[in-house]
Amino acid sequence: MAINPNTDFSSGAVLTAAQQNRFPRGVMARATSQTSYTLTTSSTTVIATGMTVTFTAVANRYYKITYYEPQGQTPNVLGNAQTFLKQTSVTGTVLGNNVLTNETAVTDQDEMIIIKTATFSAGSVTLVGTASCSSTSGTPLLVRDATREALLLVEDIGPA
């Protein structure tokens, strides 16, 4: 889809509804969690605690979606931890993913973030943040607390 930017405004000009509709509409949905989540080796992955949002999409608008985990930990064996941004459910369409790979036999940790822009059909849209790992050896986690919140955020950034 082509980008549909707003026009330049000048003193004395009439501001139209079409111009107003080209402005971003801001935050559409937000979820946070301070509860750590123990990763599993499920082949379909599992929704990470608290990482589900539902909003009403408008056709032909861009949405910026941010899924942030403050600290992911890999297994303490060779392997990986993964987060996914999916539409509808754990078995839904993958919109983006992040992989934290461990190439040594010790736990590795880092922030995990997925940022995606997308358009949707008009109507209700559910997005979920999911996670899995290649092995549960050493209890891999998504570490969260009061100062490290996980976040799933949807922002309307303007027309397509």
Image (spheres, rainbow, N blue to C red):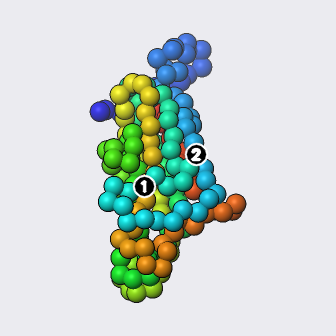
Residue drawn 39% across the image and 24% down it: 122
The image position of residue 116, as x and y in percent, is: 40, 48
Q: For the residue labelled by badge 1, is the local secondary structure a helix, a strand or a loop?
A: strand
Location of the N terminus by quadrant is: top left
- Depicted 102 relative to depicted 152: above or below: below
Residue drawn 49% across the image and 55% down it: 48
Which of the marked residues, 2 or 1, is nearer the chain's N terminus? 2
Residue that carries the numbered disc 2 in the rendered image: 31
- Depicted 75 relative to depicted 93: above or below: below
Q: Nearer the viewer, residue 67 or 24?
A: 67
Residue that carries the numbered disc 1 in the rendered image: 46
The image position of residue 52, as x and y in percent, is: 50, 44
Q: In the image, what residue type sits under mark 1? A: Val
The answer, for residue 111, to whether it is visible in the render is: no
**Outermost residue toward the bottom in this view:** 105
Q: Single out the mark in the foreground, 2 or 1.
A: 1
The image position of residue 33, as x and y in percent, is: 61, 53
- Depicted 130 relative to depicted 8: above or below: below
